[in-house]
Image (cartoon, rainbow, N blue to C red):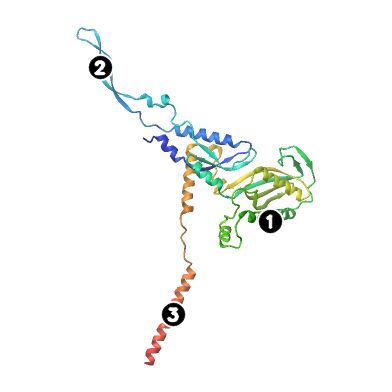
Amino acid sequence: MTTPCIRMFRRLEGLFCVYKPPGVHWKHVRDRIETSLLTGVNGTPQRPLPQVVKFLAQPGAGNDGSSELTLSAASVPVLASHPLVSGPEFQRIPVAVGHRLDAFSSGVLVLGVGNGNKALSDFYKTPATRDYTLEGEFGTATDDFSHTGRVVERSTYGHITQDKLERVLAMLQGANQKALLMYSNIDMRSQEAYEMAVQGLLGPEGKSAPILKGLRCVRFEPPHFTLEVQCLNESQKYLRKVVHEIGLELRSTAVCKVVRRTRDGVFTLQDALTHHHWTASDVMGAIQQYHSSKKLRKSPHTQTKDPTIQSRGEDKKTESQQSEISEETAVSTVL
């Protein structure tokens, strides 16, 4: 028989995303969410305990004034089904993590609950583009390419302009576009390649080297700058190294101060739950929203007719009818 705890757990099965703060390991995020889900599921109001009929001995007064025991039927609860006796119904809830973030990065982290782990595995294998925001600073180089590493070099940056930075970004993006076409393993002159490129599905088959699909500067206030990156098969360390190489191309140095993931496939920052909302009810709402959006993406798109084309067709039809009427009139006149 399905219990309220099991029904609630089934509503929790699926994918959702949270916002991982910087300085926290992804395992701590997963463990905290699993603990919160366990508390919510096991705290579901239980159905009343089953009752059984038992004969209970109760003291009574005899005819001669002596006390004697009498049996009476009574309905008593079955305490073997009580949570304090049997323990919580769920001891563990399987929560899996998709594309991971290291301890110093932040942003969108996708997780799966229950049967959502299989969907998460399929999601992990798809060539989904991930977006990042990188904040860098010119003038310093460290051993791990981040601002917390050991400083190994300092340099000037006064000669760097936004125009020079954008030229370097265009050069890097062009080189990565060639790598994307090379790893795609598909004929670029085919119709299939065109359709995949239009839908944004053009990508490498299986594992490949990290590829930057997009790279642009959104803020330039020397020595600080901010980049928006779209990439595949990346790691956060690789993105920090990209910032370091940009500094070298500009005849200077640079470190990465912030790595923030803003999108992972269909999940964006707007969908991510902050740590105040890592509860069973909020996670359930996020999973239901994901299922609803998935159904909308699968539904066929209705094609709407262009009113201008339709009106032109009607005008042509009217003109052809008028010409036929005029021809019939002319023929009748001749006859």
Residue at the far left: name it.
Answer: 63
Name the residue at 53% across, 39% down. 96
Q: Where is residue 170 in the image (x, y as percent from the top left)?
A: 70, 55
Kindly identify which residue carries mark 3: 320
| Disc 2 residue type (three-letter) | Leu
Q: Residues within 10 Å of mark 3 (few under 14, many from 20)?
A: few
Dot placed on the residue nearer the N-terminal end, 1 or 3: 1
Kindly identify which residue carries mark 2: 71
User: Is residue 277 among what the camera can see?
Assistant: no
- Alpha carbon of mark 1 to alpha carbon of mark 3: how far? 54 Å
Q: Find numbered disc 3 in the image and state the secondary structure of the residue it sits on.
A: helix
Rendered-image quadrant of the C terminus: bottom left
Kindly identify which residue carries mark 1: 174
Q: Is residue 302 positioned above or below 159 on the image? A: below
Dot placed on the residue nearer the N-terminal end, 2 or 3: 2
Q: Position of residue 105 (x, y in %)?
A: 64, 41
| Disc 3 residue type (three-letter) | Ser
Q: Decide: marks 2, 3 in contact (CB < 8 A)? A: no
- Of residue 334 and residue 308, the one placed in the foreground of this image is 334
Q: Decide: marks 1, 3 in contact (CB < 8 A)? A: no
Name the residue at 75% across, 37% down. 150
Classify residue 134 as left or right of residue 265.
right
Q: Find numbered disc 1 in the image and state the secondary structure of the residue it sits on.
A: helix
